[in-house]
Amino acid sequence: MSRARSVAVIGAGIAGLSCARALDDAGLTVTVFEKSRGTGGRMSTRRRDEAAWDHGAQYFTARDPEFRAQVDEWVRQGHAARWEPRVAVLGAGAQRDASEPPERFVGAPRMTSPAAHLAHGLTVLTEHTVARLEPDGEAWRIVTTEHGAHGAFDAIALANPSPQARRLLLPVSPALADSAASVTMQPCWAAMLRYESVISLPFDGAFINEGPLRWVARNSAKRGRTGAEAWVLHASAEWSLAHLEAAAEEAGPLLVEAFRALGAPQPAAWSAHRWRFSLAGTPLGVDCLWDPAVRVGACGDWVLGGRVEGAWLSGRHLARRIAGLRTPEGAPGR
Ligand SMILES: Cc1cc2nc3c(=O)[nH]c(=O)nc-3n(C[C@H](O)[C@H](O)[C@H](O)COP(=O)(O)OP(=O)(O)OC[C@H]3O[C@@H](n4cnc5c(N)ncnc54)[C@H](O)[C@@H]3O)c2cc1C
């Protein structure tokens, strides 16, 4: 088969959208399939009762020059902003430096904003859960749970978490499915708290070294956030695993209690969300996965590592591989 012309991207998180945007820029026809109602994946924001919480990714770094250029553009256009919280490190145990990383960025006015910007002008089919990939001659058809078959596509880019990617890859590319199976994703319980007024704590974000919590943040202190005083609490991976099947009504109060033990008052309202897949345990550490025999590849944080930054970069690498493009330095994509 000659160069791919028509590509299906599975997942509208930052990896899938960075891949789709680069493919579109290269002149390919791209369709993005997303199972949820919106874009952004784990860079997500929940809104309720005039409050908003980035209950997944909290902030991102920009160390790689290519990603840094993208973030600078987002900042110029108002889709992202620097976040300079007062950060504390609390509790005994493994210590970390509160001044690291030196620069933190957030989506603005919400964490979903960079993804929404990337998605602008692309064909993104939300509420389309990809159930399987079906061969169609030398090409592929995408079968979705809600809307049947779509295609044909010359190439497929999977940009969903490793357990979900593995399931789709298994009948198609056992080697890539094995790679996906080797990366476990940690769970994370998140609690979202609303207060009637600004609460007095000596930090806007804190890493916590003991107890159920690992991170708390005053969401309403991020740039562009309006509305009520809102805090996000994240439980540790160990605690989240131990409470994986707990109901939100059970896990939420335990996290609120742990926050109160740090000196916070009782919130006016709270809700809790279980992320079954939050951070990749040990990412593969490669730019992207690509099986040339079947023209199927995968990208995301579990592939390259580096969380938001790595996911964005991995999507770009896979796009270059699919489009047969070269890297800006002139070297072929690895
Ligand atoms: C609680 C939490 C805290 C975090 N904190 C940080 C942080 O502070 N800094 C940081 O850099 N990163 C953080 N991360 C990680 C960061 O959010 C991810 O690394 C990054 O967003 C991954 O992007 P992605 O595009 O690879 O995957 P995702 O964002 O997971 O996107 C995958 C998309 O695929 C969709 N999908 C899955 N299966 C299918 C299917 N079958 N069909 C169609 N669509 C499908 C999903 O709905 C989702 O939208 C955090 C994540 C969580 C959950």
Image (cartoon, rainbow, N blue to C red):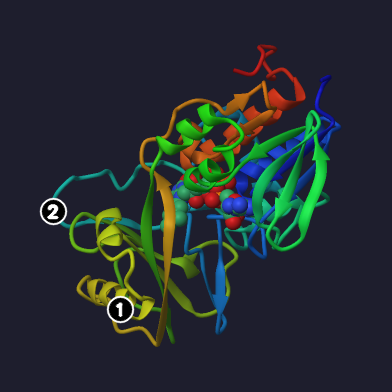
In-front residue for pair 285/64: 285
- Residue 68 seen by the camera: no
In-front residue for pair 92/274: 274
Give the mark, 1 or 2, whose residue is nearer the N terminus. 2
Is the residue 81 above or below the residue 110 in the image?
A: above
Amino acid type indicated by mark 1 = Glu
Tell me if 221 is positioned left or right of 111 in this view.
left
Report if the beta carbon of the residue with label 1 is closer than 8 angstroms to ligand 1: no
Picture residue at 65% right of the left edge, 47% below the top = 132
Residue 201 quadrant:
bottom left
Is the N terminus in the top left, top right, bottom left or bottom right quadrant? top right
Residue 92, disc:
2
Is the residue 230 above or below the residue 43 in the image?
A: below
Q: Secondary structure at mark 1?
A: helix
Is the residue 210 above or below the residue 167 in the image?
A: below
Dot 2: within a 10 Å radius of its alpha carbon, few (fewer than 14), some, or many (20 or more) residues?
A: few
- Residue 102 seen by the camera: yes
Tell me if 87 is positioned left or right of 134 in this view.
left
Amino acid type indicated by mark 2 = Ala
Q: Label 1, on which residue?
A: 250
Point out residue 145 in the picture as x, y percentages from the top left corner.
Answer: 68, 60
Dot 1: within a 10 Å radius of its alpha carbon, few (fewer than 14), some, or many (20 or more) residues?
A: few
Tell me if 208 is positioned left or right of 8 in this view.
left
Is the residue 79 above or below the residue 316 in the image?
A: below
Point out residue 283 in the picture as x, y percentages from the top left corner.
Answer: 42, 34
Picture residue at 56% right of the left edge, 65% below the top = 45
Is the C terminus in the top left, top right, bottom left or bottom right quadrant? top right
